[in-house]
Image: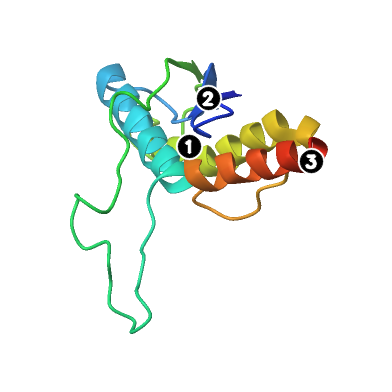
Amino acid sequence: MTIDPELGFPKIRRYAIGHNCGTVINPHIVRGMTLGGIAHGIGAALLEEFVYDEQGQMITQTFMDYLLPSSHEMPEVEIIHHCTPSPFTVFGQKGSGESGYLGAPAAISSALNDAVRPLSITIAKLPIRAAALSDAIAAVRQASNP
């Protein structure tokens, strides 16, 4: 992962995921579900947030305010399939797509924290907003160059 130091915008350089969905009946559907889960996880890690005002009224009520990932935020994804057929289903199939969503927020936040570790910055709250990241980078720069 790289980060634009001025804008705080993270760029995912490589994304690899391994999963075991048993017997793959339709590879295109499994890939689509996995990619959709990753997109959703990237949104949870970097973009999506319910925001309320001081009176408790929701501010992020529409897609104009509530950010979702688009194709621009999606990296190329390498999917490693491991097939262990389930003994409990007719064809040996299992669920698929969960690996994309469940692992993505942790993977993204870990990669982002690795990228800013040389600056002694740690981000411990999701979503990791680009504005908060650029502010943290600017604060470190300002402290080192008073």
**Mark 1 crowdedness (10 Å alpha carbons): few <14, some 14-19, many ≥20:** many
Which residue position holds label 3?
Answer: 146
Eye-nearest disc, 1 or 3: 3
Residue for point 54% across, 30% down = 6
Q: Secondary structure at mark 2?
A: strand
The foreground one among 56 and 17 is 56
Which residue position holds label 2?
Answer: 17
Dot 2 or dot 1: first in sequence order is 2
| Residue 129 visible within the image | no
Residue for point 71% across, 32% down = 114
Distance of label 2 from label 1 (alpha carbons): 8 Å
Q: Residue 81 vs residue 118: left or right?
A: left
Figure quadrant of residue 58: bottom left
Which residue position holds label 1?
Answer: 99
**Mark 3 crowdedness (10 Å alpha carbons): few <14, some 14-19, many ≥20:** few
Residue for point 78% across, 43% down = 143
Callout 1 amino acid: Ser
Figure quadrant of residue 43: top left
The foreground one among 19 and 46 is 46
Q: Where in the figure is residue 90, as x and y percent of width and height?
A: 33, 35
Q: Secondary structure at mark 1?
A: helix
Residue for point 46% across, 43% down = 46
Q: Secondary structure at mark 3?
A: loop
Q: Residue 51 vs residue 106: left or right?
A: left
Q: Where in the figure is residue 13, as x and y percent of width and height?
A: 53, 16
**Mark 2 crowdedness (10 Å alpha carbons): few <14, some 14-19, many ≥20:** some
